[in-house]
Image (cartoon, rainbow, N blue to C red):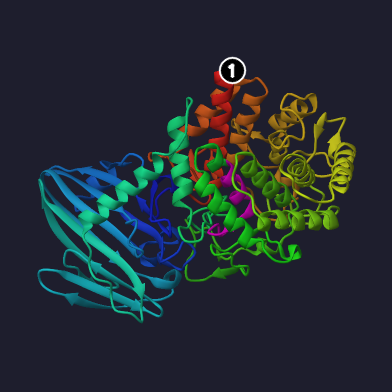
């Protein structure tokens, strides 16, 4: 049976990532990239859809006695089990630096003697391809090779025997013993890669993660949470291209048993822009430069072709389809691959990209002719399309509207263009940008502000609010303590608060064109923390922040949403936007605390 989402930890090599349950089972892994078809897909079904388990044979110990943690400032996961006969630990990691897709599972005996059991079910192509498996190697160094279509893996370690459509085995680990099992993916038309030294792989991987983390600049009461969140963002960043996936998973439901199941293994411009700002603020100018390069490459060309999201390498076609080979997490179907929202027009991305590039320039990131010309093209396109209704930040699949948040972000795009011209020499039609900025402000105040409610509204001439309105102060449209902002916060607290957390909007109004509901969206509540801190409500900021960070699982990961009734993670995980919003909220609290 699939575990609760919060029972999974992540390991990764900055090309892809695996989710490992507290029971020692890898239930999700796509090879060789985040967006490749799954090799282990039990997360979206059951063990027959692919899984790899290593745990004590003592089933009670395997499910009740496990404790785990990451080696400090790494994604090397250590899981410990105590049984009636002894104690063992398993180190799970994906090696860094070898330019190949390996998963290493090292079992170490701590005391006594423990019988371990291993079960391997390889299911390529989202559990649609049963591989041909053959034994290779020698009696001293056994291995199996599994092949189906373009994919192949070799697994080196203790002897495994076929058992139905699985391979199983047992081995005994005594105090001081070390038993390694290594799975390596390779293209099926090539020979299996040679074995490498696990000891060297482990050493290099620890050194790489800790070397990267040593540059993190984080202070304040939530510095530890900021460090882990920045590490999560790095783990979700593709090494070669610089693209960051929104999450490591697809189709984990926003409502258990519901149909709001989306593929998040792609790169949203919004997340890319916010990540750029977070990296800049925490000492990673080099990585910020790489991020900017990804942004520039992805949106290069005709601005009319601008998309809200892309593949890891900037791929533009992300056609959405439903799989029949995976039934879904806890039966929550359909399982989707691709994301149809890539065709949507979302006006807010102009603001987010321009805000991020302006922040990069402000801290001294070298500008170039490519980035300047691209910004001019973006602003020109925004000028030509400024009055278009859009699908909004939440990718509404209902009728397009003039969402107030999107209108403010367009205002921010022109505002940052003006700032770049005034302070950094960007050459463009500044007077026209000023005119458009003022026209947008006048329009927002006339149609996006509801005087009777004393609040800005979700969309023009509406009577409902949206948590995205919390970003109005973040981009400088107005001050956090402006009476209009405070009125909007009061309306959001009144209409969107559920059990102390924020919903994105009231989906029961039907504005999103989808059936079913969802749970509080964690990023929105972190935005509220930031608003509290910036407007002088520091005690409220700290209280909400303490609640939110308590929702992180035992290894510091956050999903997209949170079920406040059943105290469960909901949605795709780990969610980049949740961790990005955590970093911003923690920064705001740190600044307010220091004043």
Q: Is residue 124 above or below residue 230?
A: below
198 lies left or right of 112: right
Identify residue for label 1. 595
26 or 376: nearer the eye? 376
Residue 204 colored in magenta in the image: no
Residue at 48% across / 54% down in the picture? 237
Q: Is residue 162 above or below residue 412?
A: below
Please state the extent of the stretch shown in magenta in the rendering: 261-277
Q: Is residue 343 above or below residue 458?
A: below
Neighbor class of circle 1 (other Cα within 10 Å; few <14, some 14-19, many 20+) is few
Q: Quadrant of residue 266?
A: bottom right
63 or 413: nearer the eye? 413
Q: Is residue 452 visible?
A: yes
Residue at 76% across / 29% down in the picture? 485
Residue 426 position in % (x across, y down): 75, 48
Residue 548 position in % (x across, y down): 52, 33
Q: Is residue 121 visible?
A: no
């Amino acid at each position: 049976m699939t575990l609760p989402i919060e029972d999974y930890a992540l390991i990764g090599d900055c090309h892809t990532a695996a989710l490992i349950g507290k029971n020692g089972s890898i239930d999700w892994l796509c090879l060789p990239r985040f967006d490749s078809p799954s090799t282990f897909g039990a997360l979206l079904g059951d063990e027959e859809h692919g899984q790899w388990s290593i745990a004590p044979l003592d089933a009670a110990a395997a499910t009740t006695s496990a404790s785990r943690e990451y080696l400090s400032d790494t994604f090397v996961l250590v899981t410990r089990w105590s049984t009636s006969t002894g104690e063992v630990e398993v180190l799970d990691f994906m090696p860094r630096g070898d330019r190949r897709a390996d998963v290493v599972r090292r079992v170490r005996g701590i005391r006594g003697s423990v019988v371990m059991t291993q079960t391997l079910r390889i299911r390529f192509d989202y559990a649609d391809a049963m591989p041909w498996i053959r034994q290779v190697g020698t009696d001293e160094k056994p291995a199996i090779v599994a092949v189906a279509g373009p994919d192949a893996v070799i697994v080196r370690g203790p002897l495994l025997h076929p058992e139905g459509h699985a391979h199983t085995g047992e081995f005994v680990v005594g105090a001081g013993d070390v038993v390694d099992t290594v799975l390596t993916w390779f293209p099926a038309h090539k020979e299996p890669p040679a074995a490498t030294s696990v000891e060297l792989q482990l050493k290099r991987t620890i050194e790489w993660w800790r070397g990267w983390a040593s540059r993190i600049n984080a202070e304040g009461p939530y510095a530890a949470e900021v460090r882990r969140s920045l590490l999560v963002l790095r783990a979700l960043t593709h090494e070669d291209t610089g693209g960051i996936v929104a999450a490591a998973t697809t189709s984990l439901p926003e409502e258990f048993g519901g149909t709001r199941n989306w593929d998040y293994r792609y790169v949203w411009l919004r997340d890319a822009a916010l990540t750029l700002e977070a990296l800049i603020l925490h000492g990673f100018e080099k990585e910020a430069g790489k991020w900017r390069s990804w942004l520039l490459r992805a949106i290069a060309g005709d601005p009319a072709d601008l998309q809200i999201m892309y593949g890891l390498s900037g791929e533009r076609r992300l056609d959405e389809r439903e799989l029949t080979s995976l039934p879904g997490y806890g039966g929550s179907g359909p399982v989707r691959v691709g994301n149809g929202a890539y065709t949507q027009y979302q006006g807010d991305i102009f603001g987010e990209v321009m805000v991020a590039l302006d922040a990069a320039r402000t801290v001294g990131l070298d500008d170039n002719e490519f980035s300047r010309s691209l910004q001019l093209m973006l602003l020109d396109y925004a000028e030509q399309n400024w009055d278009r209704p859009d699908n909004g930040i939440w990718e509404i699949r209902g009728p397009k509207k003039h969402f107030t948040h999107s209108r403010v972000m367009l205002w921010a795009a022109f505002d940052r263009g003006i700032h770049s011209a005034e302070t950094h020499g960007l050459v463009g039609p500044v007077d026209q940008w000023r005119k458009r900025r003022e026209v947008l402000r006048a329009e927002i105040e006339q149609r996006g502000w509801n005087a009777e409610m004393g609040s800005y509204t979700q969309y023009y001439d509406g009577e409902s609010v949206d948590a995205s309105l919390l970003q109005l102060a973040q981009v400088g449209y107005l001050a956090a303590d402006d009476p209009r902002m405070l009125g909007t916060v009061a309306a959001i607290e009144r209409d969107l608060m559920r059990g102390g957390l924020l919903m994105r909007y009231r989906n029961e109004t039907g504005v999103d064109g989808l059936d079913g509901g969802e749970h509080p969206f964690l990023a929105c509540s972190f935005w509220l923390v930031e608003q509290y801190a910036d407007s002088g409500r520091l005690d409220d900021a700290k209280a909400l922040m303490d609640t939110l960070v308590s929702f992180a699982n035992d290894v510091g990961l956050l999903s997209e949403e949170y079920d406040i009734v059943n105290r469960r993670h909901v949605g795709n995980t780990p969610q980049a936007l949740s961790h990005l919003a955590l970093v911003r909220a923690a920064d705001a609290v740190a600044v307010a605390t220091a004043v």
